[in-house]
Image (cartoon, rainbow, N blue to C red):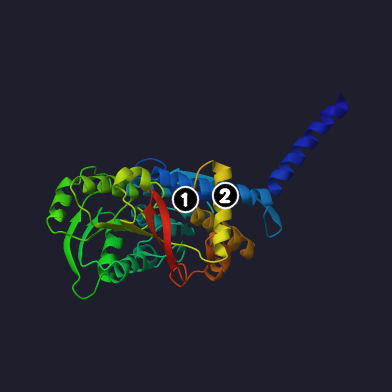
Amino acid sequence: MHARLKLIPLAFAMTAASALAQQVVKIGHVGPVSGPNAHLGKDNENAARMAIDELNAKGVTINGQKIRFQLLAEDDGSDPKQGTAVAQKLVDARVNGIVGHLNSGTTVPASRIYHDAGLVQISPATTAPQYTRQGFPGAFRVVANDSKLGGALGKYAVETLKAKNIAVIDDRTTYGQGVATEFVKGAKGPGVRIVGKEFTSATATDYAAILTSIRAKKPDLVFFGGMDSVAGPMLKQMKSLGINAIFMGGDGMCTEALGRLAGNALADGKVICAEAGGVKGAQEQVMTDFRARFKQKTGLDVQLYAPYVYDSVMVMAAAMQNAKSAEPAKYLPELKKIKYEGVTGTIQFDGFGDIQNGALTLFTYKGGKRTRIDVIR
């Protein structure tokens, strides 16, 4: 009896020693897991969890010490106020880094909170140029920004689709306005006219007034800056009003879910969009393998930015290993000079924190499914 009692303190001591030997590194993830963009936010969060689980399964060490990564996931609902509130919550939780947010409208205001706290933030989806132009050394993104995305779409509309009369709609968000502005800059050419500029909101459901105004101007192409949750219903209303123009948009609407949201209004080849990212050649098999692992892990298909979330977590962990520290001030210099081979390709950052040589993938829809047109750089 006495022998067993003596073993109890020893067991506690061994448990305590084990806990001390294993450092916990907290990675915050923020995305909209409620609201109209919840399908995209959940996609992102699932990818972050997948990355964390894989890191822990590998038994990663930093400076010789075994690490257990912990994901602290928060919901910003695609709302700037909610986004800043959860950003402060993660700062208070003393996270070691942030992966997120999804929307530019939540990422930009939250980035100041992370900056003031000395944290590193990698966005897997934010495309507003403003995000990395604020002078925050800890702000990074792993996708091309709107200057490239919107401009490339404008050029494609004019040079490849031969559009002449173009109408533009945006949802008044940071992202929607930004990508629409860059599209207009790129849509230049002989005889090209922007015949109308209209706007809606990210939560609107009735677009009859703006679409009726646009119909009168007989556009051959309508560009929409916004998310799939608005683009799908808008396509339905365009069909009901007899607007037969090509419908074009950026990454926010370029999802697998658009087919479900638009229903039979998604005519084959009549919708063109671009995803900020993309791979070619041998990298295609790497991406295919990731999608298969994601489906096996979650039971779900990748919606849009899951591979970029996964890579964001992995590249942050790699910088920590290179720096032999999970402290943001110590691994930040390693992140600035990193060259990481991820599932989305080579990740290197320029002086602003933008991805170098960011790719764009052009898609159309056939039979309600996304079909790749090309990857451009």
Q: Position of residue 256 (x, y in %)?
A: 41, 49
What amino acid is at disc 1? Val
Quadrant of the snapshot with the N terminus: top right
Front residue of 92/358: it is: 358
| Residue 53 horizontal side relative to residue 206, left or right | right
Residue 288 seen anywhere in this rendered image of the structure: yes
Residue 126 % position (x, y): 40, 58
Q: In this view, does 1 lie above or below 133?
A: above
Disc 1 is placed on an element classified as: helix
Horizontal and vertical percent for residue 297? 58, 43
Cα distance in 3D space between marks 1 and 2: 34 Å
Q: Residue at x 20, y 76 (%)?
A: 190
User: On the rendered structure, is 248 left or right of 25?
Assistant: left
Residue at left 55%, top 55%?
288
Q: Where is residue 150 in the image (x, y as percent from the top left)?
A: 32, 65
Q: Which residue lies furthest to the bottom in this view?
A: 190
> What residue sits 73% from the left and 44% below the top?
18
Is residue 77 in view? no
Which mark identifies residue 126? Answer: none
Q: Which mark sits nearer the N-terminus, 1 or 2?
A: 1
In the image, taking residue 373 as reference, residue 338 lies left or right, namely: right
The numbered dot on residue 91 is 1
Instruction: Out of 135 and 191, give the one closest to the viewer.
Output: 191
Disc 1 and disc 2 in contact, CB within 8 angstroms:
no
| Observer-nearest of 114 and 239 | 239
User: Could you tell me which quadrant the C terminus lies in?
Assistant: bottom left
Mark closer to the observer (1, 2): 2
- Residue behind mark 2: 292
